[in-house]
Image: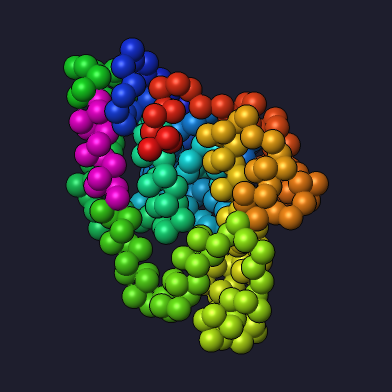
Amino acid sequence: MGLNHSFQLHYDHTQYFHLIGGGNETVTANYYWDCRQRTGNYCLFQYTIKGQGHLQIGDSHYTLKPGDAFLATIPGNQIYSLAPDSINWQFIYLEFSPHFIDQWHQMTQDTPILNFKEHPVFVKNCLALNQIGLQNTFSDYFENTSRSAQFFFDLLRISQHTHQSAQDKYPEWLIHYRQWLDIHYDQDISLEDAADIFNKSKYTLIKVFKYYHQQSPKQYLIDLRIKKAMRLLIEHPELTVKTVAQKCGFQSANYFTKVFHKKTMYSPLKFAKENTLHDSSVHYFNN
């Protein structure tokens, strides 16, 4: 239940990053979205105005308070709903074309939640963009792309500043470890290998990683491999399940299928079939 005002925008030209939909809602019950089960291919921004929401990413849980926003890629691994102890949740949301989806995904990794209390100008522009979309008063497609690009780069700047502030307290060796995982995720790597490379004990590696990421290195690596597989299935639906499994570091296609279904609620083949890219965005992913 709740109030919902939404919009969808359609253009003949889809060459550039642009706003495709959005709205504002006040939800009071039965509000639940699982991005693993959503079809389509776009970037989502959702900003809390009143009340509280709940965001889950893997084993990590976050409370969304007024002034907080989260980013998601559709499909993705976020689950969000009305917070259990909140009576309602009022928010606005904006949906954008997938032209910057890799950068958008990186922002979701670096800063799962952004707080905009110190960025009133951005919030004002965000609310204005949503209102223009609701009233459909863009003069043309190019005004949409111009405003959307400005929104994206302002958001990127704030995200990087927030991420850098957090990284100032974040162990440097852990940064390198995550970068190492992102490069070698397709290989048969172990905690012992990582501990030797980064001159840490296995116990320290697990303890420190769980402190900062609320999940073990093993769980993080599995999630990383599944995300890589999701993107590969979208970009190359012609690949066999065995090939995707091998390219993403899984030694067994059967095990890969089991984990993929657990994480996404889809089999790899069904996911690829329902999330094939539209021609308008293929050029971006082939870059």
Measuring from the top left, give residue 200's x and y in whole percent: 56, 86
Could you say where residue 176 lies in the image, as x and y percent from the top left? Answer: 45, 72
Q: Nearer the viewer, residue 255 or 220?
A: 255
149 magenta-colored? yes
91 shown above or below 69: above
Q: Against 122, is 270 above or below?
A: above
Residue 33: horizontal and vertical position, in percent?
59, 38
Picture coordinates of residue 130, whole percent (x, y)? 31, 31
Q: Is residue 127 left or right of residue 232?
A: left
Q: Which quarter of the figure has residue 275?
A: top right
Q: Nearer the viewer, residue 140 or 33?
A: 140
Magenta segment, prevailing SS (helix, strand or loop): helix
Inspect the magenta stretch and tell me whether residue 171 lies in it: no
In the image, taking residue 240 as reference, residue 150 lies left or right, namely left
Residue 247 visible in this rendered orientation of the protein: yes
Tell me which residue sits at (62%, 61%) in the image.
187
Residue segment shown in magenta: 144-156
Quarter of the figure with the C terminus: top left
Residue 66 in view of the camera: no
From the viewer's side, name the closer residue of 109 and 61: 109
- Residue 18, by quadrant, is top left
Which residue is most to the right? 254
State which quarter of the image contains the N terminus.
top right
| Residue located 71% across and 39% down the image | 241
Q: Quadrant of residue 135?
A: top left
Residue placed at 68% from the left, 47% from the top?
245
Q: Residue at x 41, y 22 (%)?
A: 280
